[in-house]
Amino acid sequence: MKYKNPHAFSHDQADKIGILITNLGTPDAPTTSALRRYLAEFLGDPRVVEVPRLIWKFALHGVILRIRPPRSAKAYRGVWTEEGSPLAVHTQAQATKLAARFAAKGAQYVVAHAMRYGNPSIASVLDEMLQQGVRKLVVLPMYPQYSGSTTGSTFDAIAADFCGRRWLPELRFVNQYCDKPAYIKAVANSIRDYWSNHKRPQKLLFSYHGVPLKYLHNGDPYHCQCLKTSRLIAEELGLEGEQYMTTFQSRFGREPWLQPYTDHTLQALPKSGVKHVQVVCPGFPADCLETIEEIGEENRDYFLGAGGKTFEYIPALNSDDGHIAALTELIEEQLMGWDVEDDAALEQRSHRAKSCPHNQKS
Ligand SMILES: C=CC1=C(C)c2cc3[nH]c(cc4nc(cc5[nH]c(cc1n2)c(C)c5CCC(=O)O)C(CCC(=O)O)=C4C)c(C)c3C=C
Ligand SMILES: [Fe+2]
Ligand SMILES: [Fe+2]
């Protein structure tokens, strides 16, 4: 059969509203073979690495996937928990808490989470949601700032799945939420909470995952959206320009990426008299390898090694209630105008359809 879900439609199944949160994805285990599988899918995505395909195929499979997986597996082993990879654990917890919020509003909501790379895959989760009767779908990629390499790629995966389906649901796709007041306030509140137990730093660093500089020059709005998020959080906190800074982390490969680089900045700050920094990562709604290990360990060592005295990482929002409330607000905005059938309307629909050949066939 060319198109999936041949039995998706039934006259007596209520239309449901699906809420799908997605994140990047993470390996299934902190092992070389799991890392090889994960990195092959991730780095094989043309949205992520924009290098001519044939050249990249040789570099990826001939060199990178031989060298990187054991090194990355070691880094993942350092952050792995009893429940699994932090990114998977936090994303699952976010979905569970969101599901509880929407369950309180009515039985018509189906909340799920999926990963762009690895498991649970977007295709498998969409399959389950549509089988459960989801006819209206909100997709919230958990990237506050839009980049083609992340949000754009998530859209590709949804679209690729839809290409194989006969009956598509209505779709609303969150493009970005870099300046949404609920999100800005949630991050600012988490920083204020941190300050209620810790001294304020000399400098607050907003560190975002980088992308190659050429993506910015080719039209990707990510850089500007990161700067906007930092400015709005700083305004919310009443910070002056010299009290905070925006930097970019997690370089991959040799070409220039967005600057200033987080690691270079942290190595330089002590020499300019800044001995106490706090780092917050507003582009990561969930703690993961890149925040726990790269910021919390590697960059801490750079700063302290260069003469810094106090380095503190302010955790991601994860599944804190303030974050879940902000996400709920974002999703509710998307749901506007989407009414759901009550039991009486469903009964009528089912009754009217008695003579439908579709019913007589089944
Ligand atoms: C805003 C989020 C992210 C952007 C933008 C992004 C771009 C990007 N990433 C790579 C390469 C790697 N990233 C890796 C890990 C990783 N990246 C993000 C988010 C963004 N990436 C997250 C949340 C994570 C952590 C996942 C986890 O399991 O915890 C890795 C894997 C780690 C490793 O092997 O070192 C790579 C590789 C590129 C090339 C890119 C933009 C083009
Ligand atoms: Fe990344
Ligand atoms: Fe910019």
Image (cartoon, grey):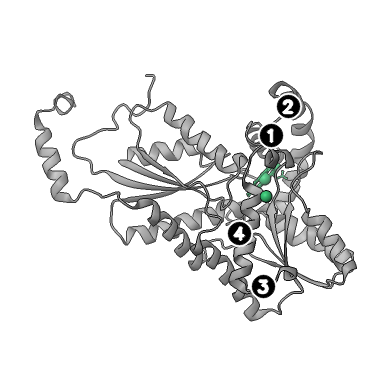
**Residue 161 image label:** none
Q: Are marks 4 and 1 in contact (CB under 8 Å)?
A: no
Per the rendering, the mark at residue 56 is 2
Task: State the quadrant of the N terminus.
Answer: top left
Mark 3 vs mark 1: in front: 3
Task: Say what amino acid the circle numbered 3 marks.
Answer: Leu
Q: Residue at x 62, y 80 (%)?
A: 196
Q: What kind of element bears circle 4?
A: helix
Position of residue 33 measured from the top left corner of the image (x, y, whole percent): 68, 36
Mark positioned earlier in the residue sequence (3 or 4):
4
**Mark 2 or mark 3, whichever is nearer to me:** 3
Image quadrant in which you'd find residue 241? bottom right
Q: Report which residue position mark 1 lands on.
A: 49
The answer for how far apart the CA atoms under marks 3 and 4 are is: 13 Å
Label 2 sits on a secondary structure element that is helix
Q: Is residue 350 above or below residue 80?
A: above
Q: Is residue 271 left or right of residue 290?
A: right
Query: What mark, if any, has residue 229 been given in the picture?
Result: 4
Instruction: Identify the residue shown where x is 65% and y is 31%.
Output: 44
